[in-house]
Image (cartoon, helix red, strand yellow):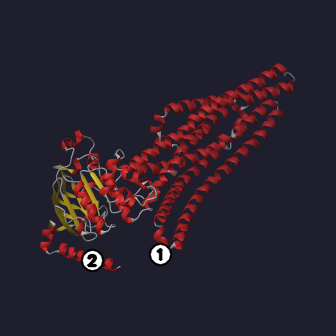
Amino acid sequence: MLAVLRKLGWFFRQERKRYLIALPLMVVSGLIEVLPPMMVGDAIDAIYQGTMTWRSLTMTLAALLAMTVVIYLISFTWHYNLFGGSFVVERMLRSRLMRHFLKMTPSFFNRNRTGDLMARATNDLNAVSLTTGFGMLTLMDSTLWMALLLVMMTVFVSWKLTLAAVLPLPLMAVLVGRYGGWIHDRFTAAQDAFGDMNERVLETISGIRVIRAYVQERAAERQFAEVTEDVYRKNLSVVRIEALFEPTVRIFVGASYLIGLGYGAWLVFRNELTIGGLVTFNVYLGMLIWPMFAVGEMINVMQRGNASLDRVNETLNDRPDVPDVPNAAEAGEAADAPEKPGDIVFRNVTFRYPGSPVDSLRNVSLTLPRGGTLGVVGRTGAGKTTLIRQLLREYPPGEGEITIGGVPIERIPTDRLKSWFGYVPQEQFLFSRSVRDNILFARDEAGEEELWRAIEAAALKKDLEFFPNGLDTLVGERGVALSGGQKQRVAIARALVRDPEILMLDDALSAVDARTEAEIIANIRRERRGKTTIIVTHRLSAVQHADRIIVLDDGRIVEEGTHEELLALGGWYKKQYERQQMEEAVGLEAGDRG
């Protein structure tokens, strides 16, 4: 039950000052709070015996007032420190999770659903936060506060009456402990179901256009209802156990009250206890109600927190499958890695995606001199994107070797490697910000001149004239306010504003027309003289100028050479080029007729 506190030991050590203030003050507050019942009992006995004076009554009332003020100040201080700590641990773990997400490779996100990761960063962290705040409060109240009250009742009132009144407590502790074990398992299942629901919501919102296009609103609603029903059932199973806590505690508290009043009255009749003592005992018994409830609350909160912390730690303990170079000393050759990349060389590279039964690249060998342009073409699924992903180190290396400037790629620190790249993927992702913010995302310190140079190179300048607020136009979630071609050009401008040593375009011109494509290619050739460029495309017109073109088929290089050399070979490249030229001619003719 208290395992969650051991798992959070690092946090309590780090925030020990906060808890060294809060916990002792809680004890001091408790020591003061047990005094008023004794004073009230003594006052009642004095009144009953006729020995009470106005002076003693005034002093008693003044003391009670002073203690109220002191307890208020102390309670404020420990509340602030204790519950402030709960927000600190939530912030720390959320930041740690975000840093972890940013370090992970695509394999991690393939294994974990986005909705489940969101649940761990929200609901689960809330449960852990509750443990370090309210959980610590219930722990103190159900142990030290209860023990203090029992000591006062035993030593200063009647040990016989106390022993009789607490007889029901051991059985209550056994039952409540059993409930806690059930809650841990059921709450874990409920949180998993909540993650599934998050994933379905994200999927539905992202695919709303497709859902409407195929008139699948009812089907989506039905599927979501099934998911929410599962969440409801699993949360209800948690609530069923939680609902047992309060009635169970109330039954045993009621039994304690019944014993206390009945046996206490009998002791008064036997003159073994005064009226004031019985009043004091009943006040203490009333104060004991919350610690009894706190036992149930503590077990509930601790088990929830433990289940949630296990889920969070499970995510944090997932290590990247592409380890970074620790430091230059351990990196060996990385210490001599150039500041700027040299030739890119693939030597007999074979790669298979994790979990896949087939190779996506097979014995690929090529050399791209620094400053050269490489065109990568081939059928869909031939391995073109996979080739680029090898340079990005998104997955563990396969067989063979990849070097940049003579240094194996796995020996180059990731930060340095990524600093060389400007990458435009097939599926462009735009943030729900302005056009300016999306372009400057790659290099926020870029000046206006550099910004506009990138915009012109991406052939985006003309479009800005039609945007409502120019560069400050909001693009909407994932760029929904822009056309496909505009999104691609914003993404290209984002890569170009960085002025990368190696630019990689992965089918990044598929949504623009032939004229705009030619303009962008011409601009890139002009702006990037002396820098390396890799262009993956289905349109052969985009790579005609390349220093070298490779044709991939089923993960193998089946043709390579310049544009002219490949045409002379008379293979797939020539056939595809002629087909595309014919399609373009037909399209232009149809356009002229229109």
Give above or below for 405 relative to 219: above
Q: 31 or 68: nearer the eye?
A: 68
Q: Which residue is mark 1?
A: 214
**Measured from the top left, where is residue 267 in percent x and y?**
79, 34
Count of numbered badges drawn on the protein: 2
Q: Residues within 10 Å of mark 1 (few under 14, many from 20)?
A: few
Specify the quadrant of the image occupied by residue 233: bottom right
Give above or below for 64 relative to 450: above
* Residue lying farthest to the top in this orientation: 55
Q: Reading the chain from its start, which is encountered first: label 2 or label 1?
A: 1
**Measured from the top left, where is residue 554 in percent x and y?**
23, 70
Q: Amino acid at mark 2?
A: Glu
**Measured from the top left, where is residue 200 in percent x and y?**
49, 63
Is label 2 or label 1 in front? 2
Give above or below for 482 relative to 210: above
Q: 354 or 138: nearer the eye?
A: 354
Give above or below for 309 relative to 116: above
| Viewer can see residue 293 | yes
At x 50%, y 75%, the residue is: 215
**Measured from the top left, where is residue 241 in percent x and y?**
61, 55
Q: Quadrant of the C terminus?
A: bottom left
Q: Amino acid at mark 1?
A: Tyr
Specify the quadrant of the image occupied by residue 538: bottom left
Q: Is residue 119 left or right of residue 401?
A: right
Label 2 element class:
helix
Q: Is residue 2 left or right of residue 451?
A: right
Q: 176 or 468: nearer the eye?
A: 468
Q: Which residue is mark 2?
A: 583
Label 1 element class:
loop
